[in-house]
């Protein structure tokens, strides 16, 4: 590239470009050269040339990023109940993930801190709910695949205008949506206005604060409710019920529970007794097709 008649700034950038070690660095100096290149007729060709190189470099960087990302992240195993946090940068996604789960994500007061999805497990009433933060929606690292298939999307926002933008982007995603308004520093009057706006729009919303931790317990409950699952406890004769519930879809039957314990178990079941919301009285004897309700206790007898 001829650099005669170019400014000393241009030449300096060109020198750095030539000695740059990585494509990212090259791109940085190439962009500097473009900025410093005079924008008049005689250097039109040269500018066009620089811009072509810029496009090619960007493509190279992007494809390298994609392959390395694929290699580093062999895919996230989806758990039974999965919620994904979506939002703009610095909205507090990592802060929320840290408060709710066992993970310790990087939290930064600069843009685009999170560059890969971060997976955590959120304990809730003896259950484990998978909670994932994905990179900010407006960043180069945003990848819709995880959010697209999540059971629930937590649309994390700090201001009302975030909501419409995020709704648009996530319009076709499959999961239920909960608008989570992370209140950094709004006063009570502002909060009331925000609340009444969200209500008027009939959003499924909740106001929380990653600073004061307000609203987090309720948020956990709302996340669990959003999955529309029922919890069923099992019990062996003359023992207390299991601590951990089995998670099932609504309208699941006694047979479904048995099969979830292990495949083929329903064939070994001789008698079943139910205590709880779906039973008329404690220890009601029921058949395999009996439909269960949330918090039922099921006792199987195999002899
Ligand atoms: N004042 C205040 N600052 C907060 C609150 N929650 C998060 N922050 C700050 O906001 C900045 C960004 O927080 P993160 O949790 O990293 O935000 P993020 O949404 O994960 O951002 P990216 O990963 O860049 O997309 C950090 O400096 C946090 O300390 C809050 O409730 N109040
Ligand atoms: Mg983050």
Image (spheres, grey):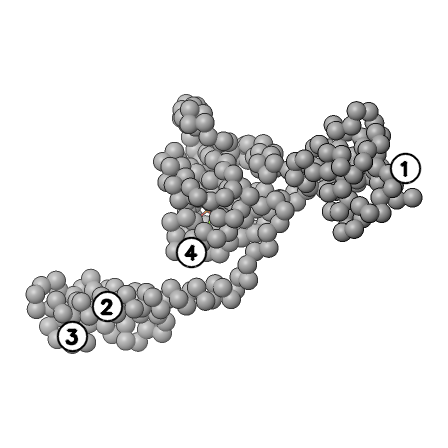
The C terminus: image quadrant:
top right
Mark 4 or mark 1: whose residue is earlier in sequence: 4
Other residues around mark 2 within 10 Å, as few (<14) / some (14–19) / many (≥20): few
Q: Give the secondary structure at mark 4.
A: loop
Q: Which mark is residue 104?
A: none
Calculate the distance from the C-alpha at mark 3 to the C-alpha at mark 1: 89 Å
Measure how far apart labels 4 and 2 are at the Cα level. 24 Å
Q: Residue at x 13, y 64 (%)?
A: 38
Residue that numbered label 4 is attached to? 141
Label 3, on which residue? Answer: 3
**Residue 177 placed where, x, y %?**
49, 38
Labelled pair 3, 2 in contact (Cβ < 8 Å): no
Q: Earlier in the sequence, mark 3 or mark 1?
A: 3
The residue at which mark 1 appears reads as: 238
Q: Is mark 3 within 8 Å of ligand 1?
A: no
Within 10 Å of disc 3 (Cα), the crowding (few <14, some 14-19, many 20+) is few
Is residue 138 shown left or right of residue 260?
Answer: left
Location of mark 2 (residue) = 52
Q: Position of residue 274 (x, y in %)?
A: 81, 32
Marked residue nearer the N-terminal end (2 or 1): 2
Rendered image quadrant of residue 4: bottom left
Is residue 278 at all visible to an observer of this figure?
yes
Q: Secondary structure at mark 2?
A: helix
Residue 288 position (above or below residue 115): above
């Amino acid at each position: 590239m001829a650099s005669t008649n170019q400014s000393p700034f241009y030449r300096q950038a060109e020198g750095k470009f030539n000695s740059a070690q990585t494509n990212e660095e090259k791109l940085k100096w190439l962009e500097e050269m473009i900025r410093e290149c005079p924008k008049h007729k005689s250097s039109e060709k040269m500018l066009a040339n620089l811009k072509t190189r810029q496009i090619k470099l960007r493509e190279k960087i992007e494809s390298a990023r994609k392959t390395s990302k694929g290699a580093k992240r062999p895919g996230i195993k989806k758990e039974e109940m999965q919620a994904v946090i979506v939002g703009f940068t610095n909205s507090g996604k990592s802060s929320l993930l840290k408060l709710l789960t066992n993970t310790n994500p990087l939290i930064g007061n600069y843009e685009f801190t999170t560059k890969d999805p971060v997976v955590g497990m959120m304990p809730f009433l003896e259950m484990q709910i998978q909670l994932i933060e994905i990179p900010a929606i407006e960043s180069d690292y945003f990848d819709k695949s995880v959010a697209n298939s999540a059971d629930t999307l937590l649309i994390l926002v700090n201001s009302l205008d975030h909501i419409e933008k995020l709704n648009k982007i996530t319009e076709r995603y499959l999961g239920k949506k909960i608008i989570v308004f992370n209140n950094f520093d709004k006063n009570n009057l502002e909060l009331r206005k925000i609340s009444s706006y969200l209500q008027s729009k009939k959003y499924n919303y909740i106001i929380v604060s990653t600073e004061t931790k307000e609203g987090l317990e309720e948020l956990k409950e709302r996340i669990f409710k959003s999955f529309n699952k029922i919890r069923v406890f099992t019990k062996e004769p003359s023992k207390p019920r299991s601590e951990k519930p089995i998670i099932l879809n609504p309208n699941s039957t006694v047979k479904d529970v048995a099969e979830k314990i292990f495949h083929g178990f329903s064939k070994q079941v001789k008698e079943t007794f139910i205590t709880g919301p779906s039973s008329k009285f404690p220890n009601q004897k029921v058949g395999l097709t009996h439909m269960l309700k949330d918090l039922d206790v099921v006792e199987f007898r195999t002899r």
